[in-house]
Amino acid sequence: MNIADLVRRNIRELKPYSSARDEFSGEAAVFLDANENPYPSPFNRYPDPLQKKLKERISELKGVSQEKIFLGNGSDEAIDLIIRAFCEPAQDAILITEPTYGMYAVCADVNNVAVKRVPLTKDFQLDFDAVLAQADTSVKVIFLCSPNNPTGNLLDRNAILRLAREFQAIVVVDEAYIDFAGTESLTRDLDENPNLVVLQTLSKAWGLAGLRLGMCFASSFIINILNKIKYPYNISSLTQQYALEALQDEQRKGEWVREILSERTAVVAALKELPIVHQIYPSNANFILVKVENAPLIYRKLMELGTIVRDRSRVILCDNCLRITIGTPTENDILIRQLSELATAELTSKSSS
Ligand SMILES: *Cc1c(COP(=O)(O)O)cnc(C)c1O
């Protein structure tokens, strides 16, 4: 498979903008090259366009070498850049397996790139034949999400790798929830699969959604393409500094993950006791998908009580489903108490009618 052939021609031939910090990136006594204000403010200097210090730490944490890492303003930036690098507007397509994260289709729509939609199976796994049937030569990128949002389950690793081997397209695996999954990342399969791209983020387990830092792991060829088309200074100095500090404390992240997983078990056990809960799908993430008696109604009642969950009932394969994020023990107790009260009220109204 020749990845270069998948890249849009104008992108392949693009001569990227070269910033002052690209042309000189070392140490010096006097910097008069970037038209910055010379007077001290904490942010008078432009940030490192390639975030070398931060990538050094991420490389150490993830066991992926630095030239295989791209950092974006959230994973969302990487999703958008991948579509722009590989999909010719009004000609090419992406393929998504639904239900899944909404941003893949939105970014494709913004770029006037068609979206081929293939449903997952009833147990939310890849329907391999259905994917292959839709995957014609216009499909340049396949987006998979594992653990999947909103269903919470991991996709079968062998099915993902088989798709990457057999299909001539970029296969993106969004691992936003991998820290909760208790399995190894597909980053370890990058070397054997030049068309594989793995996305992770600091927005979930690391507790830094407001910081906006997404990680993209791929071959150095693909990473170079993304670097060529990104905004020159896409990650602010503040984000780079703060993320570097936060990434020193891997232990704290581990404690949060353990606490959230143990709370998830407790929430699932409590929900199982409620008659308005019909099904709780197995989760490898920090949320659960729950099929209930009447999702829009329960969503609205919870909202009136001050608790916001996500109503996914209009999403394919998710009839009457709510997506519930696992919160602190106190927050989860509130949710369970409110749902039990709603269940009691529901039963009372049923028996009296
Ligand atoms: C939350 C989430 C992200 C995170 O996106 P950021 O832009 O990094 O905050 C990415 N993918 C999926 C599937 C998500 O659920």
Image: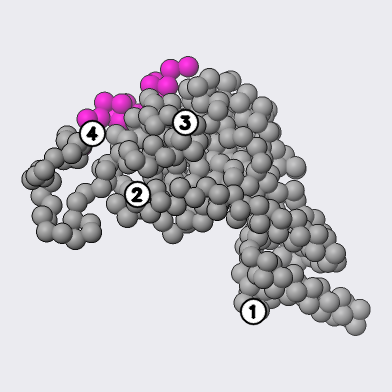
Tell me: residue 285, above or below residue 25.
Answer: below
Mark 3: secondary structure: loop
Q: Earlier in the sequence, mark 1 or mark 2?
A: 2
Cα distance, mark 3 to mark 4? 25 Å
Quadrant of the frame with the C terminus: bottom right
| Kind of residue at badge 4 | Pro
Mark 2: secondary structure: helix
Q: Which region is colored magenta?
A: 1-19
List the residue tagged with mark 1. Answer: 304
Mark 4: secondary structure: loop
Mark 2: few/some/many CA within 10 Å (<14, 14-19, 20+): many
Q: Earlier in the sequence, mark 3 or mark 1?
A: 3
List the residue tagged with mark 4. Answer: 16
Disc 1 under 8 Å from ligand 1? The reply is: no
Q: In front: mark 3 or mark 4?
A: 3
Tell me: residue 291, above or below residue 129.
Answer: below
- At a point 10% along the width and 55% down the height, the residue shown is 38
Cα distance, mark 2 to mark 4? 23 Å
- Tag 2 and tag 3, C-beta contact below 8 Å: no
Q: Is residue 195 left or right of 147 when viewed as pictured?
A: left
Q: Position of residue 112 (x, y in %)?
A: 40, 43
List the residue tagged with mark 2. Answer: 240
